[in-house]
Image (spheres, rainbow, N blue to C red):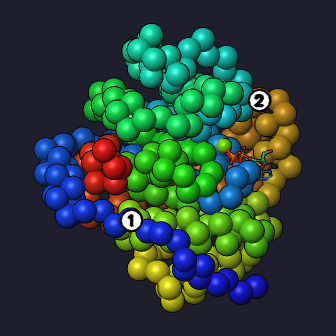
C-alpha cells in the first residue's frame, strides 16, 4: 500500500505571542499526574476499549485513575463499563452540576467523567465553554496519578483541543488501510497545525506483534519522509473474541477474562507505560495542558 501526502490543506500555525503565553502558563503549573489522550483518525478502531482496559490495568497497579469521556456528542464509555450515570459533562457545561458531582465509579475503582450521548451542541462548543470546562477539570488533577482521555475520532477542532491539552498522545490504528491513511492525516494536523513533535502509536486488532510492527513501519516511513513529527511504537492489542464477549456483557475483558490475550497485553502496556518517562514532549512541568488552547484557538 502506498500513502501519498495530500498537501493542499489550509494549515494555521500558532502565533508567536500565543506560544509565549502558553509557555508562561506551563511554568506555573506543577502536578505529578500524567495526562494521556487516546485518539485516532478513523472511528471504531478500539479507543474506548483501550482507554477503559488501560485505566483498569493502571488501577490494578495501584494508580489513581480518572477517565474522561471526551467523545462529547456520542459518549459511550459508561455503556461499555455497565455504569448508568445520572449526570454527565453536559450538566457541567450548562452549569447545573460541578465536575465533582458527575464523577462515577467504575470497575477497579477507577473514576469516570461520563459524556452525554445524542446532544449535538456538545460537539460544537464555543471557545469560552471549553476553557471553562478545562478550568473545572484542572481542579481534579492534583488528586490523580493518571487522567486518560477517550476522544472522538477525527481531526475536528473539538477533538483536537482535547488531544493537545494532554501531555502524551497515543494514536490508535488498526491494520486496515483506511485506518492507516486516517492516522497519517491526523498526525499531519498534529504536526502542522499544533506543532506537536511526537506521539505514540498503538496498533489494535492485529493477529500479533509482527503485523503490528508492519503497520508501524509503514506509517513511520511516510511520516519520516513528509512530516516533522516522530512516532514511537508503543505496542499492540490482538484481535480477541473475549474482548467482544466482554463488550456484549458490558464488562471489561481485563476484568472478566484476566487470562485472555488482550488482557495480558493491556496489563503489559500499562506496566511499560509506567516505567517509561512520562513524555518527551517539551511541555515544561504542566500536566493538564489546557493553556495550550490559548495558542491554538482563535478568539
Ligand atoms: N482488540 C479487539 N479485539 C476484538 N474486537 C475489538 C478489539 N478492539 C475493539 N474491538 C471492537 O471494535 C469495536 C469498536 O471499539 P471501540 O468502541 O472501542 O472503538 P472506538 O475507536 O472508541 O470507536 P469510536 O471512534 O466510535 O469512538 C467494538 O465493537 C469492539 O468490541
Ligand atoms: Mg469510542
Residue 250's tag is 2
Residue 187's tag is none
Number of the front mark, 2 or 1: 1
Q: Position of residue 204 (x, y in %)?
A: 70, 60
Residue occupying image coordinates x 77% and y 49%: 260
- Name the image quarter holding residue 139: top left
Query: Mark 1 or mark 2, which is nearer the start of the sequence?
Result: 1
Residue occupying image coordinates x 57% and y 87%: 221
**Mark 1 crowdedness (10 Å alpha carbons): few <14, some 14-19, many ≥20:** few
Query: Tag 2, which secondary structure?
Result: loop
Query: Which of these two is toward me, 96 or 244?
Result: 96
Up the image or down, 271 lies above or below 180; here it is above
Up the image or down, 232 lies above or below 132; here it is below
Report the quarter where the N terminus lies.
bottom right
Q: Is mark 2 within 8 Å of ligand 1?
A: no
Report the quarter where the C terminus lies.
top left
How many numbered dots are placed on residues in this image?
A: 2
Residue occupying image coordinates x 43% and y 68%: 11
Residue 12's tag is 1
Residue 254 visible in the picture: yes
Q: Where is residue 47 in the image (x, y as percent from the top left)?
A: 64, 49
- In space, the residues marked 2 and 1 are separated at their CA atoms by 41 Å
Q: Position of residue 116 (x, y in %)?
A: 61, 25
Amino acid at each position: 500500500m502506498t500513502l501519498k501526502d495530500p498537501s493542499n490543506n489550509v494549515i494555521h500555525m500558532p502565533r508567536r505571542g500565543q506560544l509565549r503565553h502558553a509557555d508562561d502558563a506551563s511554568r506555573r503549573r506543577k502536578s505529578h499526574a500524567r495526562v494521556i489522550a487516546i485518539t485516532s483518525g478513523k472511528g471504531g478502531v478500539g479507543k474506548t476499549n483501550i482507554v477503559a482496559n488501560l485505566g483498569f490495568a493502571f488501577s490494578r497497579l495501584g494508580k489513581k485513575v480518572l477517565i474522561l469521556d471526551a467523545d462529547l456528542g456520542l459518549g459511550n464509555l459508561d455503556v461499555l463499563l455497565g455504569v448508568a450515570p445520572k449526570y454527565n459533562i453536559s450538566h457541567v457545561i450548562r452549569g447545573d452540576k460541578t465536575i465533582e458531582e458527575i464523577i462515577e465509579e467504575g470497575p477497579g475503582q477507577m473514576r469516570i467523567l461520563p459524556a452525554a450521548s445524542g446532544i449535538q451542541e456538545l460537539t460544537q462548543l464555543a471557545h469560552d465553554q471549553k476553557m471553562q470546562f478545562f478550568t473545572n477539570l484542572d481542579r481534579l488533577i492534583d488528586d490523580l496519578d493518571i487522567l486518560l482521555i477517550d476522544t472522538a475520532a477525527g481531526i475536528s477542532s473539538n477533538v483536537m483541543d482535547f488531544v493537545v491539552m494532554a501531555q502524551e498522545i497515543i494514536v490508535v490504528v488498526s491494520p486496515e488501510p483506511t485506518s492507516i491513511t486516517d492516522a497519517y492525516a491526523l498526525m499531519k494536523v498534529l504536526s502542522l497545525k499544533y506543532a506537536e513533535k511526537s506521539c505514540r502509536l498503538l496498533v489494535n486488532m492485529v493477529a500479533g506483534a509482527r503485523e503490528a510492527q508492519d503497520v508501524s513501519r509503514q506509517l513511520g516511513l511516510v511520516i519520516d519522509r513528509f512530516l516533522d513529527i516522530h512516532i514511537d511504537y508503543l505496542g499492540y492489542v490482538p484481535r480477541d473474541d473475549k474482548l467482544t464477549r466482554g463488550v456484549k456483557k458490558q464488562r471489561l475483558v481485563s476484568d472478566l477474562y484476566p487470562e485472555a490475550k488482550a488482557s495480558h497485553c493491556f496489563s503489559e502496556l500499562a506496566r511499560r507505560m509506567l516505567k517509561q518517562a512520562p513524555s518527551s514532549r517539551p511541555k515544561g512541568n504542566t500536566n493538564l495542558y489546557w493553556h495550550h488552547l490559548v495558542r491554538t484557538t482563535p478568539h
